[in-house]
Image: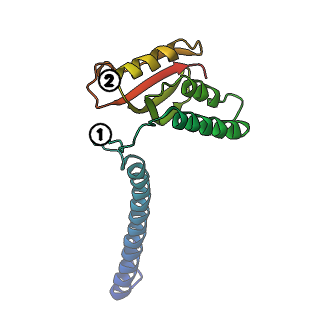
Amino acid sequence: MVNILPPDSLNVARRFCRSRVITAGSIVAVVCGIIALLALLSVYAIAGGIHVGTISFSESALPVSYDEDQASLVRSETVLKELTPLVSTSSPLRFISDTLSVRPSGILVQNIRFMRGNPATLILSGTAVSRDDINMYRSELSKNTNFKSVSVPIGILAGTKDNLFTITLTGDF
């Protein structure tokens, strides 16, 4: 096989091909880097704000009177009634309403988390005046036949968590 290009032209053609390969490789590397950055950025955005052991609850006063407690319950029920038509047929709002309706006056629910599944899970967390209120709330929730299980961590019932509580409810919601 004979090369019909002069040596100078052959070097120019080789440089041209080499630069095209380097440019294409660089573009592929940049695109892969951008894809990896976007994937990691979304994971960072999801998990970035949650640090284990540093979760803190804001200080909030519990309702001091029965009237304030009733007013907050009426507001919650009004919001639930307004949102009910917007939710699908298997609405957890009825079960949330059931949990809030049996809440003692010393309990302030600050966070409600719902996870679909079989069985579905409903997690209530907040503050309480005493652990007796938490135990009374747990026993009232246990009476509801819609909930398969009602569990409270033993440390909360023992009174070691500075009036913070978490109640996990499971059932077919």
Residue under circle 1?
Answer: 52
Which dot marks residue 144?
A: none
Which residue of the protein is positioned furthest toward the right in this rendering? Answer: 85
Residue depicted at 36% across the width and 77% down the height: 14
Residue at 50% of width from left, 34% of height from top? Answer: 112
- Say which quadrant the N terminus sits in: bottom left
Q: Quadrant of the C terminus?
A: top right
Q: Residues within 10 Å of mark 1 (few under 14, many from 20)?
A: few
Q: Is residue 147 above or below residue 116?
A: above
Q: Residue 154, position in %: x, y?
A: 31, 18
First in sequence, mark 1 or 2: give its number. Answer: 1
Label 1 vs label 2, nearer the camera: 2
- Helix, strand or loop under label 1: loop
Q: Is residue 2 visible?
A: no
Cα distance, mark 1 to mark 2? Answer: 18 Å
Contact, mark 1 vs mark 2 (Cβ under 8 Å)? no
- Dot 2: element: helix
**Which class describes the residues within 10 Å of circle 2: few (<14), some (14-19), or many (20+)?**
some
Check disc 1 and give the amino acid type: Val
Q: Is residue 44 above or below residue 167?
A: below
Q: Position of residue 162 (x, y in %)?
A: 28, 32
Write down the quadrant of residue 116 in the picture: top right
Label ID, residue 156: 2
Where 76 falls versus 150 (above or below)? below
Q: Residue at x 36, y 49 (%)?
A: 49
Residue 76 location (% of width, % of height): 60, 37
Residue type (three-letter) at the residue carrying disc 2 = Ile
Which of the pair 157/44 is nearer the observer? 157
Does residue 167 appear in this view? yes
Q: Is residue 130 above or below residue 65?
A: above
